Amino acid sequence: MSRNIEAIFLDTGNTMRIVEEDGTFQHRVRQRIAELVGTQESPDAFCDRLGERYDAYKHWAKETLIQASEKELWTRWLLPDFPPEKIAPLAGKLTRLWIERDGRRIIRPDAKPTVIELSRRGYALGIIANTISETEIPDWLEGDGLMSYFKAIVLSSRFGRRKPDMEIYLEAARIAGVEPARCAYVGDNPSRDILGARQAGFGMVIILLEQATLKKEPPRGKDKPDGFIRTCSDLLNFFPPRNIPDGN
């Protein structure tokens, strides 16, 4: 099947990167959020309250498959009791801090070498990710020297729709200039990543077995990928060099 694949799209959270908890770092993040907003509440109490509102937003987003912009997220959902003219200009910074409240995001050790090798093997690469930030993933790719390897980067925060909406997959294939049937998607969430890719007509779906994800959202009977991997480098077993015919 991989012989017909021309483009490989990757998820980021829990697929290319994982979250590493750091209590001191997370405490400073909560302090910075409270300082930036100018609240008189303690950072922990304030962020706990924001967390409840964020859970309500996530429920709405999953039901509607709409991804709010950073400004809408903060002015409508998380801080509706603050003046929007104050909060809107801070939305980008607040979003980046909010992402960091869970810990540091670090790239899997084998992710970068795998991306480089897949590109060398002749595959067009892309990213399709649900994210609340419009800048965090591009900044990470640039900082890690990976930006040039990706032909298409489609983020729900910019596109306005989120996985499993098939339109976000179709948009990525369109940007890459590859027919959906010749595209593969690699993610970690069976309940979300498989459905959208299948509906978009992607030719292949691979799931990275990430226990944290599977515990929260276990696969359903219909969520059957074409293969499972345990590390990013396992992808090299699925996608041989495109310029070498099978059997040679």
Image: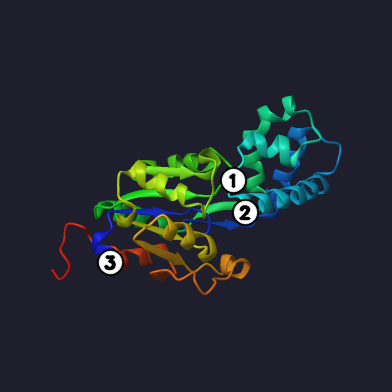
Residue type at mark 2 is Lys
209 or 158: nearer the viewer:
158
> Can I make out residue 103 in this image?
no
Residue under the image location 78 percent in, 28 percent down: 83
The residue at the point 47 percent across, 40 percent down is 138
Residue located beneath label 3 in the image: 1
Q: Amino acid at mark 3?
A: Met
Q: In this orientation, which residue lies closer to the viewer: 124 or 4?
A: 4
- Tell me which numbered mark, 3 or 2, is placed earlier along the sequence: 3
Left or right of residue 244: residue 132: right
Q: Position of residue 29 (x, y in %)?
A: 70, 44
Q: Quadrant of residue 41?
A: top right
Quadrant where the N terminus lies?
Answer: bottom left
Image location (x, y in percent) of residue 128: 45, 49
| Residue topped by disc 1 | 66
| Total number of numbered discs in the rendering | 3
Q: Which callout, 1 or 3, points to the residue nearer the camera? A: 1
Q: Is residue 128 left or right of residue 79?
A: left
Is residue 175 at all visible to an observer of this figure?
A: yes
Residue at which label 2 appears: 62
Question: Which quadrant of the view contains residue 109?
Answer: bottom left
Q: Which element type, helix, strand or loop, lies under badge 1? A: loop
Q: Looking at the picture, how far across and down is residue 79, in whole percent?
A: 76, 38
User: Marks 1 and 3: CB-CB under 8 Å?
Assistant: no
80, 18: nearer the viewer? 80
Could you give the CA–CA distance between mark 1 and mark 3, rounded to whole angstroms?
33 Å
Q: Is residue 204 above or below residue 219?
A: above
- Identify the image quadrant of the C terminus: bottom left
Q: Residues within 10 Å of mark 3 (few under 14, many from 20)?
A: few
The location of residue 75, given as percent across then percent down, is 72, 34
Mark 3 residue element:
loop
